[in-house]
């Protein structure tokens, strides 16, 4: 029998969301999906724009940042299912930029020492964050690399590391260590090279359309009508406990780079629809088979 939300739980959630909105602070959307993909709870509360007070709606579109990674993983595993790429062959076969990748051995804010990686990067490594990359906000070697390549660490330059990553070195030998980094951005590029499609187009054709999703995009060049539903990004000032609107990442609504590690915009309901695929042996709530049951079990 499909799991439902008890009246007691629903009442408690409603009470929590009734109390959630605060003047000058951004709101939230809470969604709960069961294994079969049925939305058992979906409700918004508070402001979409903390400065103007514009109301948040259930269908508000958010930049979902690293939540993009899950969908990129689904796309990659579809290609594995189809025999177009294996988990353990070198991805340099499809992404030759990775054939001569360098590993940082030592760095300072003004110097960088590297060597060529000894082990080829595989799709398995990309999907499990063991290919060797890090993020500049976690790893001082990458932070030093960013600074030495005239990239800002904050502001618009935040995206330089992610959008211009063809020469970003590794911080670990591939396959030797887990580290959170731009691995899934490269997994997205691999999906593009293997499929011959932009990542967003691949998502639409192979994941979103089969699931009946029509509001999830990397950029909105083809769907400017959705921009009015897009939530701005807020910046919190810890000293004054106030929020302002920051002018990125919505530069990305017209980006040529579809970043598999963090570039997608979607709604709570649409994201949970994709989540339900992994909860229900690869099948969406409408019966669409996105992945084979054995693939989901393997994942």
Image (cartoon, helix red, strand yellow):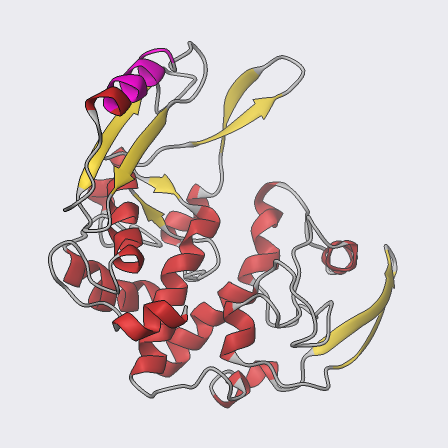
Residue pictured at 27% horizontal, 51% vertical: 216
Residue 211 belongs to magenta span: no
Give the magenta range: 10-19
Q: Specify whether 170 is left or right of 226.
A: right
Q: Specify whether 93 is left or right of 273.
A: right
Can you say whether 106 is above or below 30 in the image? below
Overall secondary structure of the magenta section: helix
Which one is nearer the viewer's eye here, 266 or 256?
A: 266
Q: Specify whether 204 is left or right of 119.
A: left
The x, y position of residue 58, in whole percent, is 23, 30
Residue pictured at 47% horizontal, 53% vertical: 262
Is the C terminus in the top left, top right, bottom left or bottom right quadrant? bottom left
Residue 12 belongs to magenta span: yes
Which one is nearer the viewer's eye here, 110 or 10?
A: 10
Q: Residue furthest front?
A: 1
The x, y position of residue 65, in whole percent, is 46, 48
Can you say whether 84 is above or below 151 in the image? below
Which one is nearer the viewer's eye here, 149 or 77?
A: 77
């Amino acid at each position: 029998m499909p799991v439902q939300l008890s009246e007691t739980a629903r009442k408690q959630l409603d009470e929590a969301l009734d109390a959630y909105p605060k003047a000058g602070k951004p709101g939230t959307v809470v969604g709960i999906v069961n294994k079969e993909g049925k939305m058992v709870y979906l409700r918004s509360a508070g402001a979409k724009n903390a400065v103007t007070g514009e109301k948040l709606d259930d269908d508000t579109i958010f930049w979902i940042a690293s939540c993009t990674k899950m969908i990129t993983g689904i796309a990659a595993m579809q290609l594995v299912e189809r025999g177009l790429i294996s988990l353990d062959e070198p991805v340099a076969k499809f992404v030759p930029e990775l054939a001569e990748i360098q590993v940082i051995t030592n760095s300072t804010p003004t110097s960088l020492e590297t060597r060529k990686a000894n082990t080829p990067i595989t799709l398995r490594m990309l999907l499990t964050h063991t290919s060797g990359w890090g993020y500049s906000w976690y790893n001082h070697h990458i932070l030093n690399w960013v600074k030495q390549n005239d990239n800002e660490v904050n502001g618009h330059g935040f995206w330089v590391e992610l959008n211009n990553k063809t020469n970003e070195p590794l911080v670990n030998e591939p396959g030797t260590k887990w580290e959170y980094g731009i691995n899934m951005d490269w997994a997205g590029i691999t999906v593009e090279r293997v499929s011959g499609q932009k990542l967003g187009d691949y998502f639409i054709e192979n994941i979103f359309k089969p699931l009946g999703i029509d509001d999830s995009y990397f950029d909105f060049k083809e769907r400017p009508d959705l921009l009015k539903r897009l939530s701005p990004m807020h910046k919190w000032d810890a000293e004054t406990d106030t929020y302002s609107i920051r002018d990125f990442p919505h530069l990305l609504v017209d980006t040529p780079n579809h970043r598999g590690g963090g570039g997608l915009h979607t709604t709570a309901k649409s994201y949970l629809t994709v989540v339900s695929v992994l909860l229900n042996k690869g099948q969406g709530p409408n019966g669409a088979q996105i992945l084979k049951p054995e693939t989901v079990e393997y994942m």
